[in-house]
């Protein structure tokens, strides 16, 4: 078996790891063969999605479709498997197997990601919000306490902006850091288990109606940590760069904040602040591992949102 084809962001991350990344890619065929034997499935072709993993189709001996995901070095799937196991299909993809040795999970097969589905942004945003409400029903003790997300994002934005030669507009940087300061110290009593990366590429339709997916969609690739529900709501609005470039960009995003806040029971001001902070941190983070073409629109649209 030759080394499988990888998604562009995954290739970029592996390239940044030098020899270790190249060795992982060379060893991927043997890892997949070992998983075939251990799980009794037959591997199929690669699937889109996954910025830090290899994802492919699989089939059980009985003909049932499955999906295999293998993590790249430095991005193990332990936390993801913990969330999926605890969720048991409620708001999330069903987890069938987890192999820590090969850092892989076997998941239910789903349809194409919401990001690949034509339609108005408002429809997709509404579906993401409704799916989050289901995902947030996970018991808070399903994941251990962790760091304050606003504090960690502030540190990340500051460090990456400096390391990358200060590509961030000064007003954008100041606004992002001010938002981080205002969002820090969220009341743990109102915390939920967050997905952490609830964008349209991580929401996929179930193949047939089932319990735990009332909106028809479930999430994949959870980061799984405790925090402010408005954080996940803000991540829903982090993308959509092509819709946020004109003079009405701020008004449009404000309307989306109101929509998400109403559907999720969160505060629209906090949703806006998280969405802006995530926009800036994502632009810098993606740029930091060599995908500047992908990262630049996030920083450019942040400028548009300030007018």
Image (cartoon, rainbow, N blue to C red):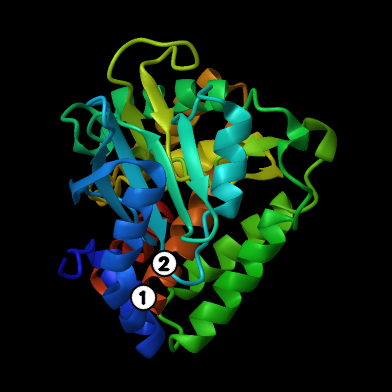
Residue pictured at 78% horizontal, 36% vertical: 141
Nearest to the observer: residue 201 or residue 104:
104
Q: Secondary structure at mark 1?
A: helix
Nearest to the observer: residue 52 or residue 105:
105
Circle 1 Cα neighbour tier, 10 Å, few/some/many (<14 / 14–19 / ≥20): some
Nearest to the observer: residue 73 or residue 1:
1
The tag earlier along the polypeptide, 1 or 2, is 1
Are dots 1 and 2 in contact, CB under 8 Å?
Answer: yes
Query: Quadrant of residue 82 in the image?
Result: top right
Looking at the image, is mark 1 or mark 2 nearer the viewer?
A: 1
Residue pictured at 38% horizontal, 77% vertical: 289
Residue pictured at 43% horizontal, 39% vertical: 220
Residue 181 in picture, x, y percent from top left: 72, 59
Dot label at residue 72: 2
Residue 252 in picture, x, y percent from top left: 35, 36
Circle 2 Cα neighbour tier, 10 Å, few/some/many (<14 / 14–19 / ≥20): many
Asked if residue 189 shows in the view, the reply is yes
Tell me the quadrant of the picture where the C terminus can be found: bottom left
Q: Tell me: residue 126, above or below residue 25.
A: above
Residue pictured at 26% horizontal, 52% vertical: 245
Query: Quadrant of residue 88 in the image?
Result: top right
Nearest to the observer: residue 279 or residue 80:
80
Dot label at residue 24: 1
Residue 241 in picture, x, y percent from top left: 29, 51
């Amino acid at each position: 078996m030759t080394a499988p084809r990888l998604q562009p962001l995954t290739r970029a991350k592996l390239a940044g790891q030098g020899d270790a990344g190249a060795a992982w890619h060379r060893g991927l065929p043997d890892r997949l063969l070992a998983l075939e034997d251990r799980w009794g499935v037959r591997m199929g072709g690669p699937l889109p999605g996954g910025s830090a993993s290899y994802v492919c189709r699989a089939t059980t001996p009985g003909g049932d479709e499955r999906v295999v995901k293998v993590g790249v070095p430095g991005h193990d799937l332990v936390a993801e498997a913990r969330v999926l196991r605890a969720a048991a299909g409620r708001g999330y993809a069903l987890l069938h197997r987890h192999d820590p040795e090969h850092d892989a999970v076997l998941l239910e097969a789903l349809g194409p990601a919401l990001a690949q589905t034509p339609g108005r942004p408002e429809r997709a945003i509404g579906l993401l919000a409704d799916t989050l409400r289901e995902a947030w029903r996970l018991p808070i003790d399903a994941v251990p306490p962790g760091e304050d997300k606003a504090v960690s994002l502030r540190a990340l934005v500051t460090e990456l902006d400096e390391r990358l030669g200060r590509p961030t507009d000064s007003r954008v940087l100041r606004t992002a850091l001010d938002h981080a300061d205002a969002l820090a110290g969220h009341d743990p009593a109102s915390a939920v288990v967050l997905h952490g990366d609830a964008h349209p590429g991580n929401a996929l339709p179930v193949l047939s109606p089932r319990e735990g997916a009332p909106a028809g969609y479930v999430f994949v690739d959870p980061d799984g940590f405790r925090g402010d529900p408005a954080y996940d709501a803000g991540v829903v609005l982090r993308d959509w760069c092509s819709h946020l470039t004109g003079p009405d960009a701020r008004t449009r995003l404000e309307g989306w904040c109101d929509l998400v806040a109403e559907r999720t029971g969160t505060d629209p001001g906090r949703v806006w602040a998280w969405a802006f902070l995530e926009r800036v941190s994502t632009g810098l983070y993606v740029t930091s591992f060599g995908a500047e073409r992908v990262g630049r629109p996030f920083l450019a649209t942040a400028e548009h949102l300030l007018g």
